[in-house]
Every structure is written in structure tokens, then in C-alpha cells.
Image (spheres, coloured by chain):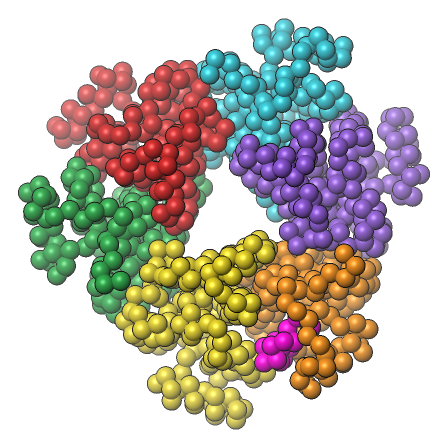
Chain colours: A red, B green, C yellow, D orange, E purple, F cyan
Amino acid sequence: MSQPPISRYPTPELADLPQDIRERIAAVQEKSGFIPNVFLTLAHRPDEFRAFFAYHDALMEKPGGLTKAEREMIVVATSGVNNCTYCVVAHGAILRIRAKNPLIADQVAVNYRKADLAPRHKSMLDFAVKLTAEPWLVEEEDRERLRRAGFKERDIWDIAAVTSFFNMSNRVASATDMRPNSTYHRQAR
Amino acid sequence: MSQPPISRYPTPELADLPQDIRERIAAVQEKSGFIPNVFLTLAHRPDEFRAFFAYHDALMEKPGGLTKAEREMIVVATSGVNNCTYCVVAHGAILRIRAKNPLIADQVAVNYRKADLAPRHKSMLDFAVKLTAEPWLVEEEDRERLRRAGFKERDIWDIAAVTSFFNMSNRVASATDMRPNSTYHRQAR
Amino acid sequence: MSQPPISRYPTPELADLPQDIRERIAAVQEKSGFIPNVFLTLAHRPDEFRAFFAYHDALMEKPGGLTKAEREMIVVATSGVNNCTYCVVAHGAILRIRAKNPLIADQVAVNYRKADLAPRHKSMLDFAVKLTAEPWLVEEEDRERLRRAGFKERDIWDIAAVTSFFNMSNRVASATDMRPNSTYHRQAR
Amino acid sequence: MSQPPISRYPTPELADLPQDIRERIAAVQEKSGFIPNVFLTLAHRPDEFRAFFAYHDALMEKPGGLTKAEREMIVVATSGVNNCTYCVVAHGAILRIRAKNPLIADQVAVNYRKADLAPRHKSMLDFAVKLTAEPWLVEEEDRERLRRAGFKERDIWDIAAVTSFFNMSNRVASATDMRPNSTYHRQAR
Amino acid sequence: MSQPPISRYPTPELADLPQDIRERIAAVQEKSGFIPNVFLTLAHRPDEFRAFFAYHDALMEKPGGLTKAEREMIVVATSGVNNCTYCVVAHGAILRIRAKNPLIADQVAVNYRKADLAPRHKSMLDFAVKLTAEPWLVEEEDRERLRRAGFKERDIWDIAAVTSFFNMSNRVASATDMRPNSTYHRQAR
Amino acid sequence: MSQPPISRYPTPELADLPQDIRERIAAVQEKSGFIPNVFLTLAHRPDEFRAFFAYHDALMEKPGGLTKAEREMIVVATSGVNNCTYCVVAHGAILRIRAKNPLIADQVAVNYRKADLAPRHKSMLDFAVKLTAEPWLVEEEDRERLRRAGFKERDIWDIAAVTSFFNMSNRVASATDMRPNSTYHRQAR
């Protein structure tokens, strides 16, 4: 396959996209050196694109009680449970970069229970994985475990919100056969 | 319990909220006669609130190949699989209203396979439920079944996107013990 | 659908039924104002009908350590796990009546862990749901938890027996596509 | 253990039991040469005892489209899925006797898919096992498969009813730690 | 069926087999009075045959901290979880012989939680069954439970290794429809 | 962590190992440039070490109907289902080398259904994954699908045997917390 499609939907021409979306894509391309396929896949739906990335940025980029590496750990663990190729590979790369650790993404994606994690991070991922796999079982006791691990109420919200957002994102990727850019596979190894 | 809390997080005072959020809440209150608890639960995070409802409206309110009743069927089936009390009850009410059918929400929430559904809707919910429960198993053959049931490519996107969004929403509700307004239980019965 | 069938089996004429079964049906009709479809579905098998209702009454109607509302909670939780439309809807109505609580049936059917339940009832449903979903895992420790919640040996028998009976009943309903009377959906809301 | 208890509940004295229950127990003892523990476990609840065995006999003893060996195959397959020691062992013995086949019970209990079964029996157990494990998935197509295998409507009812009854019985046995009589283990080997 | 095939692969002629394999088969036949079908099924692959039985003997025959009966308990519990007819039946017979207990194999195969087991053996099988069903969940805490039950580090290795080996063996048997010799069903009852 | 342990068991001194095992380890070290941790973990049990690698080589190194890359695909897919960190990472590297494809291992480990695979390989992994996750469901129809994809009887044996062997290997690794050499993570990216 010389150039496999990036998803089951046609890739729009950049020139045909609304101005704000073109600018957002140009910005990520400048920063990363390539356009992550999720931008191109969502772009044919401008309103959804805007809401998706506004939500993403509110959860993943703003200051808060969780470091960016911690947020990416949640993304990779969640995506591992959902067996989502796009998100495991793309966010695996981002996690390696954020955590400055070339091994952590593979470890968390395959089985976070055996990863080189501090107890705080083990607790955080216990919660994220339970909320992903069996959300109906999450109870006050689970939140209490997070508090005992040192998380504040706003952090618990963040853990839950990041997990929830990527449960959406994983399904958009799976439903459309979204393909990670090849670059991600080897980044920061 | 005279007045049980609407979630595990404190309910913000309306007066303390940003202007645009106050206005959005006032609008829904005027239309529905009450403020759905999801608005009050999310309001302490203005950026997330804005992104959540922008996304929601892009998927649930815009014109498209799926009727509003069909979109709510997807929400109720998804929320049933995730055993999400808030979403089954609140969107169950909305589905009864949209479909003008007092029985359909209970049927779809408990077991859509036994519901009074046209074959088109059975196919639509087969896809939504598979994408919810085992997203990694969704393949081209599943999309092909939707096409055979008369759905167009843009409709398949919509089915997938609505399912995905409520997989997020179900988890936010479960993680925070969000409580449906009592009114929903008896609406449009 | 003007009048959808009540099950996959033909509905017998009342006049053709044995005297005792006709009388039992007349009695329930007088009390409820309608004939619950389970009576009509089982009636073509008089011996099974008699045993089913004798068993039902021995478990659900006799005096004992569990209130009638508690027994119906078990039925609704069990039927929710088994995704049984007939039993969730019909016994949901009965639970609302018995518990004088318009919200409880929806809460217990979707996810009893988030319902407005006293700790005693939470423990009771923990046992019922485990016995329904993974009966082989029930051990002395599970019975011990019920004792700590205040249940006596005879109550534990009752919880187990009601759960077991409706695991039968749920399957008869699912195998025959038994349909709940429409009245149940709106009763006691 | 010289004489392990037959269940978690005290065994009643035969002399203390109601006349009809004593007679029923005497009859089974005369026929089998021993009293199956299920009779002794249920006897402290006379009304449940009567209903249970009336139901059992209506399903397992009456003439019908299924042979007695076929009914016992259903019992053993169902009990195998539910990992119910009492029912696998006791009904395993009865199946060996009814089918005049010393191997069939072990085969069906462990994995009916690999058992020495005629296609008719494979189809019958496909239905029983699906109804046991995931009753909500049973649809018209499953009944249609039984028809294609030669079963009539009344036979489909019987398959469903026997499966359902033993889903109850398995749970009563599991919840009470009912122990099979040792004799069953070696009968008809 | 006068003589059903022992697997989906042709049974090799003894005379055509390499000398060492012929001798190994002659030895087991002399000891057992028959040739277990696993020897005949594997014999057409001499290198795999040699490695399989060398591994088997290293785990099951050598002296060590676990008795031979304990090792067979692990095999039967593992094979029960994997619903492997060959291994449940053949190793069930061996367990009855090793443990000098005619009931134990049926009990362990159906549900070891309800078997007549010392606490040490219950702990041992808790570990084996978890490692079989969800190996990724095994953590230091599980090993710690074995230590508290009196097992040494080398015993934990043995429990894990026997469980692992039969997870292989169960799958070879299932993939090839390997059939247990009829003799096993009635041995040591 | 400067040098995390390679497993929960002490690493033996090479000098203390039997001659043949030392030689085998020296050979792999010369070929790979490092000693894979599985050799060091198993070495304290010489008989098991010898049987394990004899079996491994019989399945993975000998000529046959499956290429070495195909065999490694089976290993990676199996290990992905079992969430085995050691095997996904180590055999992921070997698969990248054998298949001369830097993307294939991540794709197969996360979700082979979305990997860049020929239909032959998709069928092969369908079988391996079913045999891993639910071995009791494998039936003649599954073997028939492999034949239709062009596999011969001896190839079906090989697919089953490789899958089975790594179901053992995955559990040994999980039970002992075996850690992949860091080198594997970045090999052949």
C-alpha cells in the first residue's frame, strides 16, 4: 500500500475548508511537522471539528492539577482498553514526549498494571480504566481511593473528563477506521 | 430525601456564572420549564460547558439525514448499554416527545431488540450498540449493513458521532453521580 | 401497530381455559383493571400456569421478613440485569406502587448502585445481582454481608428464591417475546 | 469430612414435614434408593416445595415432543454454563440413565459443542445455552433455527421452559451451597 | 458411533513412529493399560511431542513443594474454566486417583469454590483460575495471598507454570477436537 | 528506576548455570546483541528451560507452511488479547524485523482487525484470537474458514500450536512480571 487512506471518509482539500479550521490545521502542522489525521478526518464537519478541539483543548491544554503527561497516560490507558489503534499510537507518541520516557506508552497501552508507575498514577489509571470498561460500577468508593492517592475534587473531575472524552474519540476513530500518521509509531522512542 | 444533590459536585449559583452560560441556561429553562441537571453540573467549567453543548447541538439539533427521534433512539440505546441513569431517564423523556410514542423509550432502554422498531431503526441500533460495547469490532461489514438499510455515508457518520458523544456523556454522568430531574421520569408517558 | 401480539404464541380464548385458571384470571383482572399478559401467555399450559403462580405467590405474597416493596426491588434489579422488557416494565409499575415512589423503578432497573436506596437495600441488591449474573461466585462471604446488613437466614433464602424465580421468569418472557401491557409503562408515575 | 451438610440450611426431620411432602419424599426414595438432597433442602418451605416439584414434573415428566433424555441434555448444558455443582452432578447421572450413554453427561456439561450429538440436539443446546447466558439476545431467528432443525412450536416452548426452570434451580442450589448426593457421581458410568 | 476419531488429525501407525516416541507410548500403555489419546494426537509431530512431554514431566512428575494431587487439581480447575473436554475428563480421572477421592474431580471441574477443599487448595485454585481467565490482572497481591496460604516462592512458580502449561494443552485439545479415551470417564469413581 | 528487576524471581548467575543452558544463552546473545529476559527468567529451572525452548524452536524456527513473519503475527495478536507486556513488546520487535514493516506490530497488538493485513492473515488471526479468548467455541467451521483462506491441514495445526504455546508463555510472563528488555521497544521502528 503506497498511501493508505486516512479514514473511510474522503480527505477534504485544505483550500476548501473554512478559514478558522485552515488556520488551526496550519498551526498544528507547524508545531508537529505534519498534520495529524484526526484533523483531516473531522474537517468536513466544521461545527463538530470546532467543538471537538475546543473540548480537547479545555481538557488537555489548560493549567490544572494534572500534568500533561498524566493526562496522556489516561488517554493511552483508555485507548488501550478500547483497542483503538489511532489513539494508542498517536497519544502513545505524545505520552513518550510529555513523560520524557521512551518505554511508558507501550507499557501503559498493553497493561498499565505492570507499567513503571508511581502509586498515584496506578490509582489514577485504575479509575480511568474502570470508568472506561464498566462506567456503571463507578461509585463513591472509587472517588475516595483517588482522594487517598492525593487527588483533589477538581483533579477527579479532570480524570473523569479526560477518560470520557477519549471514550468518545476512540469510538469516532474506530467507526471511521481512522489511521494514525506513520510518524507517530517511531516518535520519541 | 427532601432534595437530593444533583451530582457529587456543588451546584454553582446562576448569578456567578458567565453571561453566555447564564443565557444558555435561561433559554433551556424557558423552553423546558426546568433546568436539566446536566447544565448545572457542567457550569462550573465554562470552557467544557461551551464545548459540550456546541458539540451536542452540532450533532442533535442540526438538519441532517436522521430525524431527531432517531438520534434520541441512539442516545437511549447507548445509555442503556452503559447503564447510565441520567441519560436513560432524561433522554428517554426526550425520545418519547420526539417520537410521539409513550412506550418506545422503555423498550429501547431495556432491550432494543424487542422494541417496536422498523428494520431501519433496528439496524441503526445494532451499529450503535456494537460501537458502544465493543468498538474495536466495528468493521466495514457493519457499515455495509447500514448502507443496505438505506443509510448514506453522512448518516453513518451521524450514527457513529451521536453514539460516541453519548459514550462520553454517559461517563461524565456516571463519574459524577449526576441525577436526572424528577420531571423526566413522568414526561410524555 | 394497532394491536401488537402479546407473545410469539397464540392467545387462548378465556372460554376455552380450565375453570380454575379462568377464575384466577378474572381475579387479577378485577384487582388490576386489566389482564397482565403473563397470565394469557402461560394459560395454554395449565399445569405450568398453576405451578408458576403457586410459586410466585409463595414467594411474593406470603408474610415474611421482606416487605413486598423489597421483593419487587429484587425483581426489577434482576430483570434489569437480564434486560427483560416484560419484567422491567410490569414489575417496575408494581414496585412504584408498592414503594409509593415514582422514581425508584427506573433507578433500580438502570443501575441500582445509583438509586435512592437505604444501605440494607443496596446490600440486598448486591446479592441479587451477583446471583443473577454470576451465580457460581456466590459464597458464604456474600451471605455474611447480608447478615451484617440485618437480614436473617430466612430472609437470605427469600432474597435468593425471588432472584432465582425471576431468572426463570425473565427467560420465559425473553424466549417468547412476551410484551408488557401498555398500562404498566405509565402506572404510578 | 465424614458427613458434610447438604446445604447451608438445616435439614428438617422427615417426621416434622407435612404429610404430602413426606409421601413425595418416600416415593422418590423408593424409586431412587436414596433421597436427593434437593428434596430435603426445599422441604422446610412446604409451599415452595410443592410449587417447585409441580413445575418440575409438568416440564420433565409429562409426555411431549422432547424425549426425557433430551430434556436432561438441556438441564445439563444449562447447569454447565451456570457452573452449578448440584445440577451438573445430579442431572448428569439422570442423563446417563435416560440416554443410556455413560459419556454424554460429561461431554455436555463441559462443552456440548464437542459432544457426540445429533444435529437436532446441537441446535437444541445452542438455543438453551444462549437463553441461559444472554437471554436478551434471543430473537425470532433463534426460534427459526429450531424450526429448521425439526422442532415444533410446542417443542420450542418446552426447550425454553426447561432452560428457564433450571436457571432458577441452578441459582437456588448455588445460593444455598446445595450438595449433590455422592451416589450421583458414580451412577450409570 | 462405533469408534469415533480421536481428533481431527489422522492417527499415525505406531510402527511408523520414531523409536523414542514408540517407547514412550509403550511405557504409558503398560502403566495405564491404554494409550491416552494425547500421545497419538501429538505423535505425528515428533519434535513437538518430545518437547510437550518433557515439559509435562518437568512440571507434573518431578519432586517439589506441590503434591501430585495438588498439581492435578490445578489442571482440572484450569481445564474447567477453558471448557476443555479432553483435559477435564482425562485429568479428572488422574485427580481422582492421585487424591484418592472419587468426588473431587467433578467438584473442581464444575466450580472449585464449592468443592471440598482445604483453604490452602482454595487459594491455590483462586490463583490458577485468575491466571487462566484474566492473566493480565495477576499482581503482587495475588502472589502475596499464596504466601499467606503457606506457599513458597518455588511453589508459586509451580502453580503458575502448571496453569500456563495447561492453558496451552487445553487449546491444542480444543483446536483439534481431541477426544478423551472412554476409560477416563469411569476411572476411580 | 536505574535498573528494574527482570522478573519477580532472582536472576541466576550465568556461571552457575548448566553448560548447555549457558551455551544457548551465549548463542542468543551473540545473535541479538543482548540476552532476552525470558532466557534469564527461565534459567533457574533447567528442565523447564530446555523443554520451553525446544518447543519454541519446533514451532517458530522449523521450515513449514507459515512464514516466520506469519508466526510472529500470531504471537503478537495472541499476546495483545492477553495484554502481556513482555510478549507484545519483545515479539513486536521480532515481527517488525521478520515482516520488514515498522508499523505492523503496533497495528496487530492493538487491533488486528484494523491492521494492514492481507485477507489470508486476517483469517489466520481470526482463528488465533478466537482460540485465545474462547477456545471452547472453536469448531470445524473455524477450521473450514482457514482452508478457504488457503491454509492446509498442517498449517492449521501450526496456527493452533503457536497460539497455544504463547497462551502458555503469556501466562508465565504475567505471573512472574517478566519485563521486556528496553531494546525491544525501539528495535526496527
Residue at the far right in the pictured view: E30
Q: Is residue B185 left or right of residue C120?
A: left
Residue at horizontal 71%, vertical 8%?
Answer: F15
Position in image of residue E7 (x %, y %): 76, 43
Q: Is residue D49 magenta?
A: yes
- Per the picture, the main secondary structure of the magenta-coloured stretch is helix
Residue at horizontal 80%, vertical 78%?
Answer: D30
Q: Is residue B170 magenta?
A: no
Q: Is residue D28 left or right of residue D51?
A: right
- A45 up-or-down from C103: above or below: above
Q: Nearer the viewer, residue C78 or E22?
A: C78
Position in image of residue B49 (x %, y %): 18, 42
Position in image of residue A32 (x %, y %): 27, 18
Residue at horizontal 60%, vertical 15%?
Answer: F36
Q: Nearer the viewer, residue D13 or A96?
A: D13
Viewport quadrant of the C terminus of chain F: top left
Magenta part of the chain: D40-54
Residue at horizontal 48%, vertical 31%?
Answer: A113
Q: Is residue A132 left or right of residue F153?
A: left
Residue D123, by quadrant, is: bottom right
- F163 up-or-down from B129: above or below: above
